[in-house]
Amino acid sequence: MADPLLPTTAEQEELVATRRAIHAHPELKYEETVTAALVDERLQGLDYATRTGVGRTGVVTVLEGEAQGPCVLLRADMDALPLQERNDVPYASTVPSVMHACGHDGHTAMALTAARVLRRLPLPARGTIKFMFQPAEEGGNGAVAMIEDGVLEDPKVDAAFGIHLWNHLDVGKVAIVDGPFMAAVDEFTVRVHGVGGHGAMPHEARDPVLAAAHVVTALQQIASRHVDPLDSVVITIGAIHGGEAFNIIPDVVELRGTARSFDEATWEGLPAVIERVVTNTAAAFDCRAELELERLMRPTVNDPAMAALVREVAREVVGEENIVDDRTMGGEDFAEILARVPGCYFFVGSRNEAEGKIHPHHSPHFDIDEAALPIGVRLLVGVAQRYLDLH
């Protein structure tokens, strides 16, 4: 007998068509007006009452059960990246230098189809399913914007689940992790100040280039000498700027980088460690360093009980042998939701080597195997129903 929670053939066709339509018309963070309008129109066509403009360009709707009860939230992000697509496909981006290179088009399409499937099924006996279509996951903290606009209230959310297509996993695989799943993300800038001079007479200068080079090296020792080796920390310098001529020692060198960490306590303590290393290393070369650090995202931490619930549903969909433990040092603003309510964020494999769907996220050649989409829909529907059944 066919699984009633799976999208029908017609629903799967619409699912793929919706993903492709969104892919062809990508929008950057907080500019998702066309995507939000599509979401709003589709939901209203299914007799959902919608709230738009949540967190500037987000959309929220609810499916109420027959009686009052807990509220479970399902989240999908909508924004694209500032990237020129290099794929030769009929649904390629029509917007220059903007591309869905992270799968958010698929997330939105899956959540819309999940709303369609849930609408044709019997209503939950009790409780509410809330859909959160979020803007600005890519560096805009859209989750925070929607939280500030009340997405977790009216009705109050009791549990939350988020889904991400993942090209590091083959189609048919699902990644579910207890506890820390994605890393905290910090962005920092270090300015090393010295005294410029002639490259042939460095003793008359205080060389910030030399000092900055040692700062870069010293920062790499934080993971190996300042953090528990059983914990995971990554510090990467992605940009170095200083000087204009081959024979002139500059006054200032600027470094820009990122720090990633899983453990909350480690994350809390990293700024002080980075500042100490940067300041003292520069001082050893008679230079002065200043640090600016911005906390972009906290660690994404899954509640073990909610992860167990997702794992139980995933066994029915893909089988135990296809459930894996796969963490990443990438960051995700769904962490702000999970810091406020118990929940689980999980990955659905979208890689298919035979079809050439192998490129990583944020690549101009990124694309997914669309066979992953109905798997994601089934998981969203199953997780929402299972949560309300159990609570």
Image (tube, rainbow, N blue to C red):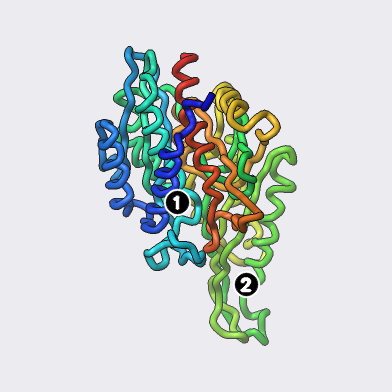
Q: For mark 2, does the 10 Å Cα neighbourhood hold few (<14), some (14 to 19), or many (20 or more) residues?
A: many
Which residue corresponds to mark 2? 209
Q: Position of residue 261 (x, y in %)?
A: 61, 43
- Name which residue lies at 58% across and 43% down: 183
Front residue of this view, candidates 170 and 97: 170
Tell me the element at label 2.
Answer: helix
Q: Position of residue 178 (x, y in %)?
A: 62, 29
- Name which residue lies at 65% across and 54% down: 353
- Name which residue lies at 50% across and 38% down: 374
Which residue corresponds to mark 1? 138
Residue 55 seen: yes
Residue 279 seen: no
- What's the residue type where badge 2 is placed? Val
Q: CA distance from mark 1 to mark 2?
A: 32 Å
The residue sitting at the front extreme is 1
Q: Is residue 68 above or below residue 138?
A: above
Give the number of callouts. Answer: 2
- Name which residue lies at 39% across and 27% down: 118
Q: Position of residue 91 (x, y in %)?
A: 43, 59
- What's the residue type where badge 1 is placed? Glu
